[in-house]
Image (cartoon, rainbow, N blue to C red):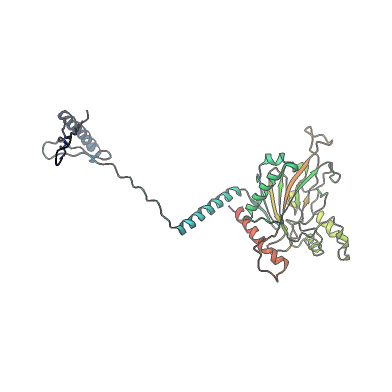
């Protein structure tokens, strides 16, 4: 039974003629006798229980907020109820206008950094020369598979923006974008051949006088099984420094020849470089699929949504003699019953961004520098951004 305290407040209505009015004080608080007796009994019972617990544990004291002890003579128990602890609330930090601006900028940059880290979590470096990265699921695979060139504007803008984020936000007005389509039924694809070769030769992305071009981003729009070919091949990526093919590559670049099927292979400087061009193409032979570790090439197989990034120039701005590349021959898809007859047509679709050095309004002070020095500043910035992201 709980104790009830009834407080009755009375007041005297002030007469209109009274000079002064004094409110009648409330009556004194009354204590219900039976309630008081019940509390005393409850306290004694609680004290007895706590005393027994103290004896068993050879310690004194009760639960949280309660203590029990013995009186001097009559062992009367006293129940003491402690108030609950006071909750302390930390004061909100205060900033002046300058501090607030700095803090707001920090929060924005940190959020962007964390989002970039999340978005670039799958970026993998697969080569240092040429500097090369891949990233699976860079774009939605289903969207890539159903994409058509006629209905691609929004997709292309998203692709361009996503690549720009990987490069620290750099986006050049001179950057180009191109759709490429190939089929195993194309005249230059020998669909029944088992030989790994390049139906369109190998080339540098700086060919056709694209001297400011330095970075290529290839997005694969559909899957191509390994047995059907279609990979992007870099035949010189893993060759030794003293390999004769590197010397051939440098001779071609010195003659400003950027394609092994170019008419300039014979005409430039009156020197026939056809043998050098053939040597480059021959570095990937028919045994590649059987023993990839024996090859000096890097092979990137198409997979819907996969991104391939590679630099055609080194950090110094020079053309990288290992960055020659080409599309591997496409072969028909094999039949389910493994018959030797021609199977279904295999297609390969890619979307490519060709990045060119573009400083915009922030041109560096390099009036008397070489072309390579001029290009190197932005190349280094972008390559360092990709290297950092690949290490997250």
Give the residue at x 73% y 66%: 371
Question: Can you name the residue that lies furthest to the front here?
Answer: 17
Q: x and y percent of residue 157 in the render?
A: 68, 48
Q: Is residue 193 above or below residue 13?
A: below
* Residue 386 position by quadrant: bottom right
User: Residue 53 appears in which quarter of the rendering?
Assistant: top left
Residue appearing at x 33%, y 45% in the figure: 87
Q: Quadrant of the N terminus?
A: top left
Give the image location of residue 20, x and y in percent. 14, 41
Residue 48 image point, x, y percent: 20, 33
Q: In which image quadrant can residue 323 be found? A: bottom right
- Residue 71 relative to residue 296: left or right: left
- Relative to residue 351, is residue 36 depicted above or below? above
Q: Is residue 112 at all visible to an observer of this figure?
A: yes
- In the image, residue 178 lies at what x, y percent? 75, 49
* Residue 223 seen in this snapshot: no
Q: Give the residue displayed 72% in from the left and 60% down from the top.
A: 313
Which one is in front, 294 or 214? 214
Q: Viewer-proximal residue, 119 or 286?
A: 119
Instruction: From the viewer's perspective, tell me whether residue 316 is left or right of residue 41.
Output: right
As drawn, which residue projects farthest toward the bottom? 368
Q: Is residue 18 left or right of residue 332?
A: left
């Amino acid at each position: 039974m709980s104790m009830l305290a009834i407080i009755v407040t009375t007041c005297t209505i002030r007469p209109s003629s009274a000079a002064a009015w004094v409110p009648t004080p409330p009556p004194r608080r009354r204590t219900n006798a039976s309630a008081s007796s019940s509390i005393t009994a409850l306290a004694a019972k609680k004290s007895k229980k706590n005393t027994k617990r103290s004896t068993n544990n050879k310690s004194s004291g009760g639960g949280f907020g309660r203590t029990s002890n013995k009186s001097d003579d009559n062992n009367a128990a006293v129940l003491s109820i402690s108030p609950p602890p006071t909750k302390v609330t930390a004061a909100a930090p205060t900033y002046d206008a300058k501090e607030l601006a700095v803090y707001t900028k920090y929060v924005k940059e940190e959020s962007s950094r964390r989002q970039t880290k999340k978005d670039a979590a799958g970026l993998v470096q697969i080569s240092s020369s040429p500097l090369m990265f891949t990233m699976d699921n860079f774009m939605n695979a289903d969207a890539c598979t159903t994409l058509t060139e006629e209905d691609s504007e929004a997709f292309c803008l998203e692709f361009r923006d996503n690549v720009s984020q990987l490069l620290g936000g750099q986006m050049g007005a001179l950057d180009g974008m191109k759709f490429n389509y190939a089929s195993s039924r194309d005249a230059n694809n020998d669909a029944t051949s088992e030989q790994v070769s390049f139906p369109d030769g190998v080339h540098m992305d700086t060919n056709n006088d694209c001297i400011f071009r330095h970075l290529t981003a290839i997005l694969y729009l559909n899957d191509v099984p390994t047995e059907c070919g279609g990979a992007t091949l870099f035949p010189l990526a893993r060759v030794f420094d003293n390999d004769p093919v590197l010397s051939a590559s440098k001779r071609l670049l010195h003659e400003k020849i950027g394609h092994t099927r170019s008419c300039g292979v014979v005409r430039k400087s009156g020197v026939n470089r056809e043998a050098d061009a053939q040597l480059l193409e021959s570095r990937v032979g028919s045994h590649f699929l059987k023993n990839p570790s024996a090859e000096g090439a890097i092979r990137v197989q198409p997979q819907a949504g996969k991104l391939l990034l590679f630099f055609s120039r080194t950090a110094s701005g020079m053309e990288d003699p290992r960055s020659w590349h080409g599309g591997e021959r496409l072969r028909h898809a094999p039949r389910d019953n493994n018959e030797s007859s021609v199977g279904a047509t295999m297609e390969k679709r890619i979307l490519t961004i060709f990045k060119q050095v573009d400083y915009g309004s922030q041109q560096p002070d390099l009036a008397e520098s070489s072309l390579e020095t001029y290009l190197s500043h932005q190349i280094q910035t972008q390559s360092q951004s990709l290297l950092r992201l690949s290490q997250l």
